[in-house]
Amino acid sequence: MTDTAWIDNALTSARPQAVGALLRYFRNLDTAEEAFQNACLRALKSWPQNGPPRDPAAWLIMVGRNVAIDDIRRGRKQEPLPEDDHAISDTDDAEEQLAERLDGSHYRDDILRLLFICCHPDLPATQQIALALRIVSGLTVKQIARAFLVSEAAMEQRITRAKARVADADVPFETPGTVERTERLAAVAAMVYLIFNEGYSASGDTAEIRSPLCEEAIRLARLLLRLFQSEPEIMGLTALLLLQHARAAARFDADGAVILLDDQDRSRWNSKMIAEGLALIDKAMRHRRSGPYQIQAAIAALHARAEKPEDTDWTQIDLLYGALEIMQPSPVVTLNRAVAVSKVRGPEAALDMIEPLAARLSNYFHYFGVRGAFLMQLGRNEEARVAFDRAIALANTSAEAAHIRMHIDRLMRDSKPRGAKAGK
Amino acid sequence: MLYAILCYHDEDTVGSWSKEQDAAVMTKLRVVQDKLTQQGRLGPVARLLPTTAATTLRKDDPPVVIDGPYAETKEQLLGFYLVDCKNLDEALDVARDLGKANPGGAYEIRPVGHFTPGSVPK
């Protein structure tokens, strides 16, 4: 039996480029996807015999386009594979020519357009992600449904609906200008981060099922980085995803309960991903054009660099969160900063910092978890307990609730019989 | 005679290997490497980080730093250095010094992911 894994890999990695180019030809997503599918079928037939083409993407674009044009000419959609592969034998000479014409800059805008279509502002975030995973990454509906923990039928419907909405949208096909390209890139980067978070925010019992989302997001980030080699924010995004995902194996215990950063077995962090993440931040910093992804990546890097939790450079993390607060003000950023502040200046200062956030984060699990932890450090156990109770009520997953319950157990154990706490 | 064996492969393909696939390949390679090591014939082995982590210094006057791997085809690979540096800036400084001594062409600077020093008789 021949090993076809290499063909699958080649088809997967050529997909964004090929579908992107076919979309530019046909200006219709369904036609482009179908053309790509047909080209893949022919590749599966031809490549095992003839070996891989020099440029698989160019081959697929060429064949996909020819087949689709044939189909359109004949006015019918379905057609059995031709016995003699004339569509294929033609391509050998033409391939090089085509590859010439489709130089890097073309590909770049094709792929960016394809991704950008998926981030249509009318689509809710979950639909954007599902659409991108289907169209750009080529995951099957079944795979996507599994990662989202919904039924296949529900996911099928979600994707169909998203596609219909995108089809009605007016997508410009001319080459984007600099400003437009920058805007598209920012929207696409945000979507890639959403895909990652969809996988990263999984609870312990679903983390393994959902981690392909993280891996796919990293693949897309690398793809973007290869297309836009000098964009520090894309370097930052890729680094951020790598540094966060590097901790995947250490984030949950055998029962699926959350293990906090301080308690994680750091030998289980993926050193290869960390090395790549650190190298990318290094590259990004040279540009002296800071941005939210770079700052978040730099924070993740400071954690990754610390061999033991007590080696963590919290002062630097505090400063970085301060910079992020200015760039992207949000109560959640301030809450994260407060954790760093508690390490540098103590829990009292940290508590003062999050007090004003109470109204805006009154339904946010982490707010009460963090608040409870500060209060506990201050020995204000009764108040801590109230905060933890509120956190449990707001927990999104059983793992989150279990984690807070652990704090409460510790409070119960530690607190003196009469709750003697003089310090305030 | 010492021979350098330079490894080329499709980065997307290798990058899309699962952890298990990657480990399986590494295990098979180690069998070959171990044999060479026992014979005292294996020098340094390095696995480079992806080209997305690469930076190129064009040795023009003045030298130009470009993000990304060396992409031209009109020059050929003639040699390489392994240098221990604190960060990319330091590596670029080394490359600039080398470039002053030997202008023209380019250096591609790639962080090394995995490294075994090996040993061969001089």
Image (cartoon, coloured by chain):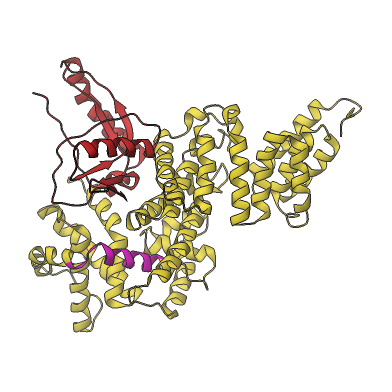
Chain colours: A yellow, B red
Residue A3 horizontal/vertical position (percent)? 20, 45
Q: Is residue A416 left or right of residue A272?
A: right
Number of residue marks:
0
Residue B98 horizontal/vertical position (percent)? 24, 36
Residue B49 horizontal/vertical position (percent)? 32, 39
A56 in relation to A157, above or below? above
Judged by its main secondary structure, the magenta piece is helix
Can residue A153 be seen at all in this image of the molecule? no
Q: Is residue A179 left or right of residue A82?
A: right
A117 in relation to A265, above or below? below
Which quadrant of the structure image shows residue A410?
A: top right
> Considering depth in this image, is A180 or A201 the residue closer to the camera?
A180
Q: Which residues are magenta?
A: A101-115
Residue B56 horizontal/vertical position (percent)? 28, 46
A32 in relation to A218, above or below? below
Q: Is residue A198 left or right of residue A71?
A: right
Quadrant in which the C terminus of chain A appears: top right
Q: Is residue A240 left or right of residue A412?
A: left
Task: Name the residue at 19% across, 73% down.
Answer: A67
Quadrant in which the N terminus of chain A appears: top left
